[in-house]
Image (tube, rainbow, N blue to C red):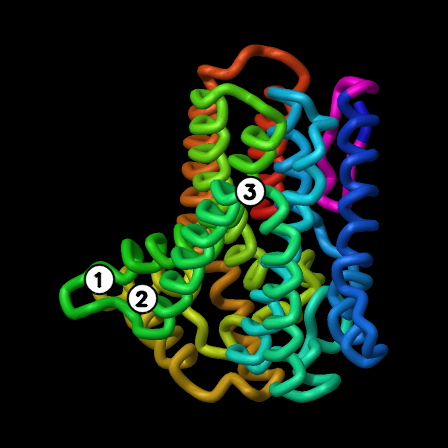
Amino acid sequence: MTVVGPFGLHVRDQALEADVQSGLAAVEAGLLEATKSDVPFITDAAQHLVRAGGKRFRPLLVMLASQFGDPDAPGVVPSAVVVELTHLATLYHDDVMDEADVRRGVPSANTRWGNSVAVLTGDFLFARASHILADLGPEAVRIQAEAFERLVTGQILETAGPRDGRDPVDHYLDVLSGKTGSLVAVSGRFGAMMSGADERTVDVLTQYGERLGIAFQLADDVLDIASDSHESGKTPGTDLREGIPTLPVLRLRAQAAAYGKPDDLELVELLDGDLSGDDALAEVLRRLRAHPALEQARQDTVRYAQEARATLAPLPEGYAKAALEELCDAVVHRAG
């Protein structure tokens, strides 16, 4: 059993491991090539997060999904580059909106070069992704456009908040379906489609990616509170400090509203207060780590990962399917 990639997937077959490793290496080379510019400053900014590393979760899913067709088909690696470039571009924009200082263990682009450069660099990456996508055919362009629309819609819904009478948890899960699930779903879809897999397999891997993407983000929500050294490279409590609603916080608020326990109401009041100081943030983190809302969020993560696993049932048994199931386990493991 071999660990593949920064995400820590365990692969049980040497041939599959070789295919995945080779594909991910080609993606890495493709990312560096796609982020080059005739202007050295643009290259530095565009490659800032590429060189910082990352889990390459989406390209990994492309590679595994391609195993249900021809993994050496010419569109597989470029499609993986497209989804990762798109993801990276959203990170540049997210860090501006969140006023984040750190991303993947390095200063965020907005901290290093300012908001304008960070936003424009994200736009540059979107443009490069579109250029590669154009060579993959009109169907690929349409799929990516629809996913990008869902991604942006999810971001807008998060910013706008739930409408009156809407359950904030349901609203948040819809947000995640767009913001995260859409692009992970495309990763599964592109891997299968570009490899020439049949339509049923493409549909299964698209559904799998959607659910796995939501589980992946929910695991990040848990990690933002539970982890001392955040695996995503962000400082623990970043989302809390920025007032970004995450599932543990939404679960806490729901319990406080339903039962009115003094400790819960006090913790909500602290969350709504000034968390710019390290001591205040540390106190909120300490109390949230001991609160049942965090365990509820973990169980939500497990539920979505289990749903992702269940969608794989129609696929033929083999090492590729086992690796996709292992990916579900890896997501749950991240959430503790």
Within 10 Å of disc 3 (Cα), the crowding (few <14, some 14-19, many 20+) is: few
Secondary element at image label 2: helix
Q: Disc 1 marks which amino acid?
A: Tyr
Secondary element at image label 1: helix
Q: Relative to residue 148, is residue 25 depicted above or below?
A: above
Within 10 Å of disc 2 (Cα), the crowding (few <14, some 14-19, many 20+) is: many
Q: Is residue 6 magenta?
A: yes
Secondary element at image label 3: loop
The residues tagged by marks 2 and 1 sit, at their Cα atoms, a distance apart of 10 Å
Instruction: Determine if residue 53 is in view.
Output: yes
Q: Relative to residue 90, is residue 335 depicted above or below?
A: above
Residues drawn in magenta:
3-15
> Residue farthest to the left?
165
Q: In this view, does 307 lie to the left or right of 279?
A: left
Specify the label residue 137 is tagged with: 3
Q: Give the residue number, with chain letter if any, for mark 2.
A: 253
Q: In this view, does 83 lie to the left or right of 102?
A: left
The residues tagged by marks 3 and 1 sit, at their Cα atoms, a distance apart of 55 Å
Q: Give the residue number, with chain letter if any, for mark 1.
A: 259
x%, y% of residue 161?
30, 71
